[in-house]
């Protein structure tokens, strides 16, 4: 089962260190084991990474000819369209709904939509992360803000965006699993993110990721 997070990207994103936004975004998008899609305001899929192809069951070139409407489960399409518009209006929204795979099966997914305040208004990043939660109503997080998150928290978020599990993050950063969980909890509290999918989406949109290649050896 997967969760669905969506964030509107912006051209003004500047990464704290190392590569510029586009280079870092492209590297994470292409290399991540987390399913990611870039969609426009009309929900047409413009770009898909390999992880998304594996998750949905269609190769990226096929996904890039589809729309999010074709990935919906047996839900009220009017309701989902309204949620999409609400998310774009409010700036952020998250909930759980089913998604349809290539073989017709459906999976409950958590989705988080986070929009940019400017930049490319038609570019929206969709991120899928595992969940076992039942369908729920949508929640709007507290007001958007620029939180003070630590460099270590940024490193943890970057590794989550790349698809790493807690134990892998602990190994990469030479810290314990509990310390990883603490960093995630603190980052979510600081940013107002409701879940990891939402945290990744916010990070990609607002420039909280770091270039791990620039860390001291």
Image: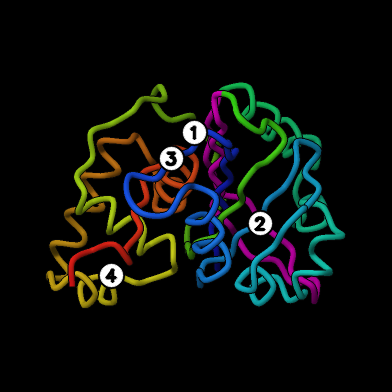
Q: Percent position (x, y) of residue 84?
A: 69, 35
Q: Of the residues under marks 2 and 3, which one precedes in the sequence? A: 3
Residue at the (56%, 22%) spot, across then down: 90
Q: Are marks 3 and 1 in contact (CB under 8 Å)?
A: no
For marks 3 and 1, give the CA distance.
28 Å
Question: Can you tell which mark lies on residue 37?
Answer: 2
The residue beneath circle 4 is: 166
Q: Residues within 10 Å of mark 2 (few under 14, many from 20)?
A: many
- The residue located at (44%, 69%) in the rendering is 163
Q: Nearer the viewer, mark 4 or mark 3?
A: 3
Residue 38 drawn at (x, y percent): 68, 51
Q: In this image, 173 relative to 40: left or right?
A: left
- Distance Cα–Cα, label 2 vs label 4: 23 Å
Between 152 and 17, the one nearer to me in the picture = 17
| Residue 182 falls in image quadrant | bottom left
Between the residue at mark 4 and the residue at mark 1, the CA separation in whole angstroms equals 26 Å
Q: Which residues are magenta?
A: 91-117
The dot on residue 14 is 3
The reply to whether callout 2 and callout 1 are in contact (CB within 8 Å) is: no
Among the two numbered marks 4 and 3 on one chain, the one whose residue lies closer to the N terminus = 3
Q: CA distance from mark 2 to mark 1?
A: 22 Å
Tell which of 37 and 82 is nearer to you: 37
Give the SS element for disc 2: strand
Q: Is residue 115 above or below residue 205?
A: above
Give the mark nearest the N terminus, 2 or 1. Answer: 2
Mark identifier at residue 139 = 1
Please tell me whether the stretch drawn in magenta is mainly helix, strand or loop.
strand
* Secondary structure found at label 1: strand
Graded by Cα atoms within 10 Å as few (under 14), some (14 to 19) or many (20 or more), the crowding at tag 1 reads some
């Amino acid at each position: 089962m997967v969760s669905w997070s969506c964030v509107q990207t912006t051209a003004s994103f500047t990464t704290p260190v190392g590569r510029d936004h586009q280079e870092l975004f492209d590297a994470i998008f292409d290399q991540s084991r987390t399913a990611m899609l870039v969609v426009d305001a009309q929900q047409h899929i413009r770009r898909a990474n390999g992880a998304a192809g594996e998750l949905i069951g269609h190769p990226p070139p096929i996904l890039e000819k589809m729309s999010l409407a074709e990935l919906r489960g047996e839900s009220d399409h009017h309701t989902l369209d309204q949620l999409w518009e609400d998310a774009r209006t409010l700036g952020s929204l998250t909930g759980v709904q089913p998604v349809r795979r290539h073989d017709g099966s459906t999976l409950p997914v958590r989705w988080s939509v986070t929009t940019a305040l400017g930049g490319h208004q038609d570019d929206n990043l969709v991120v899928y992360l595992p969940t076992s939660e039942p369908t729920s109503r949508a929640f709007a997080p507290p007001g958007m803000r620029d939180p003070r998150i630590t460099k270590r928290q940024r490193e943890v978020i970057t590794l989550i965006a790349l698809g790493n599990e807690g134990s892998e993050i602990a190994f990469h950063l030479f810290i314990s699993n509990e310390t990883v969980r603490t960093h995630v909890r603190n980052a979510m509290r600081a940013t107002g993110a409701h879940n990891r999918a939402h945290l990744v989406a916010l990070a990609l949109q607002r420039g909280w990721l770091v270039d791990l290649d620039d860390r001291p050896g």
